[in-house]
Amino acid sequence: MLKRLKFMFDLFNKIVVGILFVTAIYIPVFYGWNTVLYPKILWDILVLSIICMLGSILLPLEGEKEVSRNSLLFRNILYFIYINMVVLCFGVFVEWFSFRNWRQLLGMLAAIAFVYAAVMVISYWLERREAQRLNQKLKERR
């Protein structure tokens, strides 16, 4: 249980950073550099990140029951669909964009894909680096 919570909060941190990065690009592109923002957007980003993090329960953890490659792919696709639905619905709810503006919608879909891919790549890279570190320590002990 503790391992799951650590994984989820690590993921939460990566999601927040990803959303902030994309927001810093998305807002000037679609609304201009002179757009006035209110502190509410920070709470919106935190709430969205929490909701996205909660969906990670679909993803298997290392050391848990082994899953097949197909199962892993299916879970990742399911999580990606979950993320898309959550971000699109939440974004419309808090008026970040409108489904009527197809450019904003395409921008949001691109932003979702970018953050998702960045979070997954960074997570994979960090896990791989940790595995290499542990393997190196095992070699040193022998």
Image (cartoon, grey):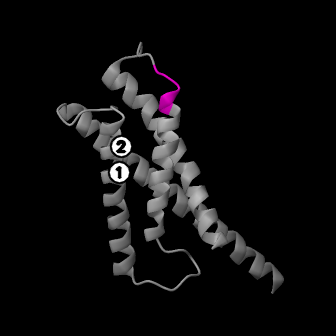
Range of residues picked out in magenta: 37-41
Identity of the residue furthest to the top in this view = 34
Q: Which mark is residue 36?
A: none
Q: Residues within 10 Å of mark 2 (few under 14, many from 20)?
A: some
At which x and y percent is residue 93?
33, 38
Q: Are marks 1 and 2 in contact (CB under 8 Å)?
A: yes
- The quarter in which the N terminus is drawn is bottom right
Q: Secondary structure at mark 1?
A: helix
The quadrant where residue 23 appears: top left
Q: Which mark is residue 86?
A: 1
Q: Judge from the rendering whether residue 127 lies leftward or rightward of residue 44; answer left or right.
A: right
At which x and y percent is residue 81?
31, 59
Give the residue number, with chain letter if any, for mark 2.
Answer: 90
46 in the magenta segment: no
Q: Amino acid at mark 2?
A: Phe
Nearer to us in this view, 71 or 49 = 49
Q: Residue at x 64, y 63 (%)?
A: 6
- The quarter in which the C terminus is drawn is bottom right
38 in the magenta segment: yes
Relative to residue 97, is residue 12 depicted above or below? below
Q: Secondary structure at mark 2?
A: helix
Relative to residue 26, is residue 120 depicted above or below? below
